[in-house]
Amino acid sequence: MKKFWLMWASIFVISACMSKSNSSNNSSKITAMDTNNGQYEIITFGAGCFWCVEAVFQRLEGVVKVESGYSGGEKPNPTYKQVASGNTKYAEVCQVTYDPKVISFKELLEVFFTTHDPTTLNRQGNDVGPQYRSAIFYHTAEQKEQATYYKNKLNEEKAYKNPVVTEVTPYKNFYVAEDYHQNYYNNNQSQPYCSYVIQPKVEKLRKVFGDKLKETATN
């Protein structure tokens, strides 16, 4: 663990020197230019069940919006049932809108890689299938550069026992998931999945990134 955090510190020092969505009733198209005149930026993360990802990123200071949905497939307007089959090429993701003046993309990457297992292919815990793959759908060339650099650095430094298999791929679409998936953890904390799967991730977030958290999680 000590090696892991020393490695992250070196990444931040080095990287500091580097400088279409489809339209439909349930799709969402958000760009930095559309969002408050460019004040905010967008990144789309897949890290297993989107309920977990949403709960983590909602709690970060500087994150202004998190939406659960589907990215990476081809068929328009996918449903949860279709994506859950594992045959659509879609991944469960969260589209994160953030203020780069408050939280940097590098910090979001650090949270992303720390709060899920990026070494398991098409799997997070008991959630198995390509829809649960670890993925970064980048929106800009800079995001691609930084995400690829971080992934490669983690592997070079052997930060994990096994290689990082996170997919770094261009963003092409995002469809908002059904209403009952939104704000799921905040609304259903007594549910077994929330208690046994999501809560430990939230607790880890508080322990490791306590200085980056909001007082109250909002979406």
Image (cartoon, rainbow, N blue to C red):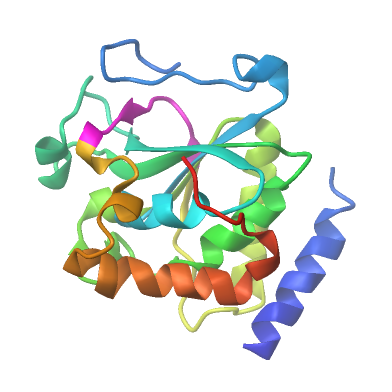
Q: Position of residue 213 (x, y in %)?
A: 62, 59
Residue 170: within the magenta? Answer: yes
Residue at the outermost bottom position: 2
Residue at x 70% of width, y 20% of height: 38
Asked whether 204 or 174 is in front, the reply is 204
Name the side, left or right, on which 95 lies relative to 63. left
Quadrant of the drawing holding the N terminus:
bottom right
Residue 18: within the magenta? Answer: no
Quadrant hosting residue 52: bottom left
Which region shows up in magenta?
169-179
Quadrant hosting residue 41: top right
Q: Position of residue 175 (x, y in %)?
A: 31, 27
Q: Position of residue 87 (x, y in %)?
A: 14, 41
Asked whether 167 or 192 is in front, the reply is 192
Residue at the outermost right position: 17
Residue at x 28% of width, y 59% of height: 122
Q: Where is residue 205 in the image (x, y as percent from the top left)?
A: 53, 69
Residue 86 seen in the current view? no
When the figure is inspected, residue 219 is found, relative to residue 22, above or below; the finding is below
When the figure is inspected, residue 66 is found, relative to residue 160, above or below; the finding is above
